[in-house]
Amino acid sequence: MVYKKLAIATLAVLGLQMNSYATEKSHNSDKADAKTESHHAIWTYEGKTGPAHWGSLSEKYALCSTGKQQSPIDISKSTKTDLPQLEFNYNPFPLVIANNGHTIGVVTDKGGLLKIGEESYKLWQFHTHAPSEGTINGKHADMVIHFVHVNAQNKDQLKFAVVGVYLEKGKTANPLIETLWKVMPKTASEEPQKHDIQIDAKQLLPQDKNYYTFTGSLTTPPCWEGIKWMILKQPVSISAEQLAQYHALYPHNARPLQPLNGREVLSSN
């Protein structure tokens, strides 16, 4: 029951159900008790409802303007340190895919675990942005996949850990992207689509798991902060055709870079 509430909260906050957004009583405790609303402020990636205006669209989105630990960021300086390895103990799971009007995403409660040292996080969903949200030395990748996890130990307080994997256009098509794009919904819908297909999210990960890490936020409203971010250094390949298929739906769905405000970026090597 607790995990069901967490799943609803996570889907709501990250917009993978079209008419669902989390309601906050307080910034910390309500993440685990989030309830969905039938009406929410409409936000987009351009114009009067674009990123520059998110913070004024709803009082629940205030952090999008006032927050000091916002994502995405440019990684141009980092401190090498002895960080724990990322252990992706993912499992194959049935495909449930969504087009929510902002992104293409996959949701699951059976995706397995991410271990970071002594901490364990459960994979809840992954979704896509083009170009990449975030840059390295000022350079965007062609796309990014965000793997969103919630803590698997303290079930009373929802904590997010997001792993970003950059995709660069190359000659090699990604086999899992090929599977996803064949069935991805072409129009936005309130309900994710279930398919009789087993997928393995590990197919979207690079061989090298070295990473950068920093404290940040959700990159979409309500822009909650205190999110543990890890950006893998090695990109994976996506073909020009696969990228064009995505651009036909979402040519630009990336939030602009946010200021560091004194945050330190750590590097695993």
Image (tube, grey):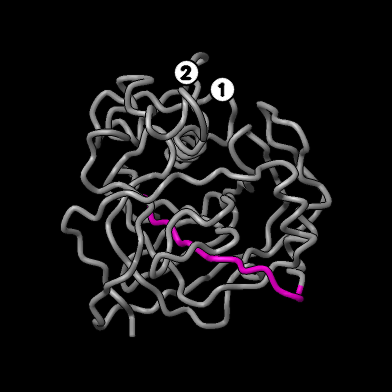
The residue drawn where x is 32% and y is 74% is: 117
The residue drawn where x is 49% and y is 27% is: 47
- Which type of secondary structure does the marked residue at label 1 adopt? loop
Give amino acid for label 1: Asn
Q: Where is residue 234 in the image (x, y as percent from the top left)?
A: 51, 77
202 left or right of 249 in image: left
* Nearest the eye: 158 or 52: 52
Magenta-drawn stretch contains 161: yes
The residue drawn where x is 63% and y is 67% is: 204
86 left or right of 17 in image: left
Q: Do the residues labelled 1 and 2 touch (CB within 8 Å)?
A: yes
Residue highlighted by disc 1: 19
Q: First in sequence, mark 1 or 2: give its number.
A: 1
Image quarter of residue 102: top right
Q: Position of residue 74 (x, y in %)?
A: 35, 61
Magenta segment: 160-172
Q: Residue 40 carries which label?
A: 2
Q: In which quarter of the image is the C terminus?
A: bottom left
